[in-house]
Image (cartoon, grey):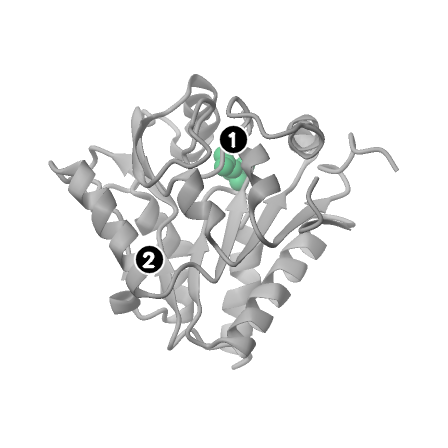
Amino acid sequence: MTADLTLQIEENYSALSRAAARLVIRQLEEKPDSNLVFATGKTPLGMFDELAAAYQQGRISFENASLVELDDYYGIPLEDPRNLFNWLRRDFLDRVEFPLRNTARFLTDTSAPVEECARIEQFIAASGGIDLQVLGLGPNGHLGFNEPGSALDSGTRVVRLAPASLESSQRYWGEQPVPEYGLTLGLGTLAAARKTLLLVSGGAKAGILHKVLSSPLDPCLPATALHTFPDVLVLADREAAGALGD
Ligand code: PGA
C-alpha cells in the first residue's frame, strides 16, 4: 500500500453513500469547475441520490463542472437503454441539471473507435486533467473496463469484456445480452487523476478488496494500479471490509 492510499470504513451502504457525496460536495466547493469521472454500476447509486438531494436543497451546483464518461459498451446505438451514459443521465446528470455541453461521452456506435478514444483523451487534456474520479471495483478487480491483463500504463481504448464482467453486468440488463466489447479510460489515464475515490460495498466484494489492498502491482488484478495513483481514498462499508482484519 502506498502512503497515498487511505482506507475509510463506514458502517453500512447509506453511511458510505453519504460520505462519498460529502467528498464530492467538498471538491466542488474547493473547485467549482472540477473535471469529474463517475462510474456507473450499482455501487454509486446511493451517492447519486445524496447528490440529487443536496442539489434540491441548493447545497451543490454542477454549473461549472465537467464530466468524462469512465466507460461504456462498444457497438450499441446511442439511445440503447444499455448505453452507460444514458444510465448516468437517468440516475445522476439529469437530476442535478448537469450541463451536458460540459460532458464527454463515448460514441458507442462509432465506426472509428481509435479516433473516438483519442477524442476523449483530448477532452481530458483540454479540461486540465481529471480532478476527482469516483470508481467502483469489479468482481475480478477491474477498474472501469480495464480487465485483467490491462497494461498499467494503458490509454483509452476498445477492450473485450472478461467473462466475469459479462456475468456480473447481466444483473443490470435482465433478458438483454451484455455487449461483448467496451470503451474505457485506460489505467494510465486514470493514474493521472488528482484524486480517486473507490467505493466498495457488500460482502461479495470483501475477497477482491482484500486481494487488491494486499497485493503488489499486478496486471492480472487491474485495481492494484491504485497503488500508483497520487491520492486515493478507498471507502468501504463494513461488509466489504470484512476480510481486511483489524
Ligand atoms: P457494481 O459494479 O457497482 O454494480 O458492483 C462495479 C464494477 O463492476 O465495476
Q: For residue 27, what is the image quadrant?
A: bottom right
Name the quadrant containing residue 73: top left
Q: What residue is disc 2 on? A: 124
Q: Residue at x 61, y 65 (%)?
A: 23
Q: Which residue is mark 1?
A: 222
Q: Residue at x 21, y 51 (%)?
A: 119
Give the position of the C terminus as an image quadrant: top right
> In x, y percent, where is residue 161?
37, 25
**Please, what is the three-letter code of the amino acid marked with disc 1?**
Pro
Give me the residue at 42% from left, 29% from top: 151
Question: Would you say 176 lies left or right of 222 here?
Answer: left
In the image, taking residue 237 as reference, residue 228 lies left or right, namely left
Closer to the camera in the image, 231 or 62: 231
Q: Residues within 10 Å of mark 1 (few under 14, many from 20)?
A: many
The residue at the point 37 percent across, 43 percent down is: 185
Q: Residues within 10 Å of mark 2 (few under 14, many from 20)?
A: many
| Sequence-first tag of 1 and 2 | 2
Using residue 143 as the reference point, say whether residue 126 is left or right of it.
left
